[in-house]
Image (tube, grey):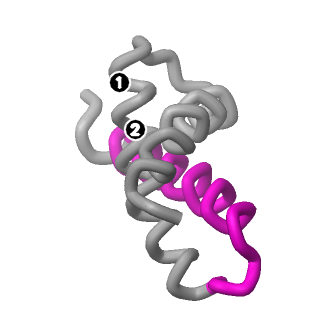
Amino acid sequence: MGIIALIIIGAAAGFLATRMMKMEADIPTTMLIGIIGALLGGLILRALLTMMGALSGFVGAVLGAMLVIWLWQTYFRR
């Protein structure tokens, strides 16, 4: 899965992750969280689970976005 596909999936993953983590954010923040999470989670899972195909990219994107939200809420939000 290419970087462009991870960015597109990241926008959807960010939306899903913000809803799962019960975080209220505006659209650009949600997309940024999803894109960063997709790049982190998608690339890591892609390296670990190359046999699962596109599904591993989306799962990795959602997990990565949730990680970014957790880090944001834990360390950067006051």
Q: What range of the chain is rendered magenta?
A: 49-73
Is 64 on the left-hand or right-hand side of 72?
right
Residue shown at 68%/59% (left/top)? 59
Which numbered tag is attached to residue 29? 1
* Depicted 16 relative to depicted 48: above or below: above
* Depicted 50 relative to depicted 18: above or below: below
* Other-residue count near label 1 (Cα within 10 Å), few / some / many at <14 / 14–19 / ≥20: some
For marks 2 and 1, give the CA distance.
6 Å
On the image, the x and y values in percent for residue 44 come to 47, 76
**Disc 2 element:** helix
Residue shown at 43%/44% (left/top)? 7
Is 49 on the left-hand or right-hand side of 31?
right
On the image, the x and y values in percent for residue 9 come to 56, 43
Is 61 on the left-hand or right-hand side of 16?
left
On the image, the x and y values in percent for residue 58 come to 65, 54
Question: Which residue is disc 2 drawn over?
Answer: 33
On the image, the x and y values in percent for residue 22 come to 62, 26
Residue shown at 50%/56% (left/top)? 64
* Other-residue count near label 2 (Cα within 10 Å), few / some / many at <14 / 14–19 / ≥20: many
Taking depth in this image into account, of 62 and 72 the one nearest to the observer is 62
Q: Amino acid at mark 2?
A: Ile
Q: Is residue 30 magenta?
A: no
Look at the numbered discs 2 and 1 and tell me whether their residues touch, using CB distance below 8 Å. yes
Q: Amino acid at mark 1?
A: Thr
**Disc 1 element:** helix
* Depicted 36 relative to depicted 14: above or below: below
Q: Residue furthest toward the top?
A: 26
Q: Is residue 69 magenta?
A: yes
